[in-house]
Image (cartoon, grey):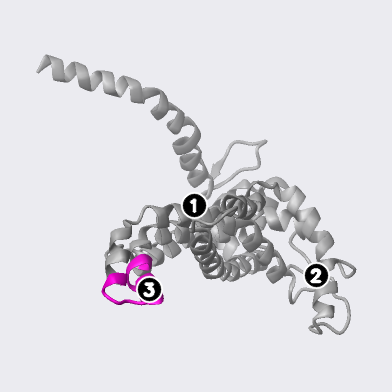
Amino acid sequence: MRSQLRTTLIAYAFLLPALVLMGVYTFWPMAFGTYLGFARYNVITPPQWVGLDNFRELAGETDFWTGLSNSLRYVLVVPIIQLAAIGAAVLVNRRLPGIALFRAAYYVPVVTSFAVVGIMWGWMYDQYGPVNWVLRGLGLLDRPVNFLNRPAVALYAVMFVTLWKGFGYYMVLYLAGLQSIDRTYEEAALIDGAGRWTVFWRITLPLLRPVILLCSLLSTISAIKVFEEIFVMTGGGPAGSTYTAMYYIYSKAFQDFRYGEAAAASLVLAVVSLLFSLLNFRYVRGGQVA
């Protein structure tokens, strides 16, 4: 009994540093941020409890609803990025000469900073940039367009950059998932006469569901709280067409110093993320062979 108690105490002693760090850098900021959602705070004076006033003000803020609407539209990039990542993972999951080079090439945008990506795509989207040159060469455009200055297309132009930069990250996760699947399932199905597409649809894809769920969760939450692309490429413009909920939170907190409203908006965004996560669990969870 004494030996078991000693072993338990030693285990908790090893966990204690990590628990302290999590408490200081994770749980305390979460608790304080939640409290600020119900308080008025401008850094200079101490927080004052105001109940639900911050949420009532949010409900009347046009900018908040514009940002939330654009953030929800940004979720449209999630199924596209997942399909692209699965397709790329299947393509590079082959033993071909030089395949490692292709895998690395797909991953390069992931490790490139958003500052560099924003400058590069800002030039590419310019009316004299290569995107206009290609589209006009294909006959899809009559005259040059500055994509980031057009309210109708600016958000979708930024979404494409998110797709381009992020799908390599999910491709690596899917590639790891594909390589962890026991090949005897697929080989047995092929021996029984199933086609390649049937094997993929009925065996490979169901076995990949845990990875699909993980990637869907990560990409959905990233889309809802998108900020860096917007900050670097458009600053929320033109005419608020790329103004997202996270950009609203940033503006309230670090430009207007209204931390209470920013925290309240963060709580609303957290609830929205939770709802989308539950939908992912509802429709994607699984992992059994069909």
- Contact, CB < 8 Å: mark 2 with mark 1? no
Three-letter amino acid code at the position of disc 1:
Gly
Name the quadrant containing residue 65. Answer: bottom right
Mark 3 and mark 2 lie on one chain; the one further toward the N terminus is 2
Point out the image quarter for the C terminus: bottom left
Whether residue 32 is visible: yes
Query: Which residue is tagged 2?
Result: 131
Q: Secondary structure at mark 2?
A: helix
Q: Does the magenta segment cover residue 220?
A: no
Q: Nearer the viewer, residue 239 or 129?
A: 129
Q: Secondary structure at mark 1?
A: loop
Magenta stretch: helix, strand or loop mostly: helix
Query: Which residue is tagged 1?
Result: 51
Mark 2 and mark 1 lie on one chain; the one further toward the N terminus is 1
Point out the image quarter for the N terminus: top left
Query: Which residue is tagged 3?
Result: 201
Residue bounds of the magenta highlight: 190-205
Name the quadrant containing residue 188. Answer: bottom left
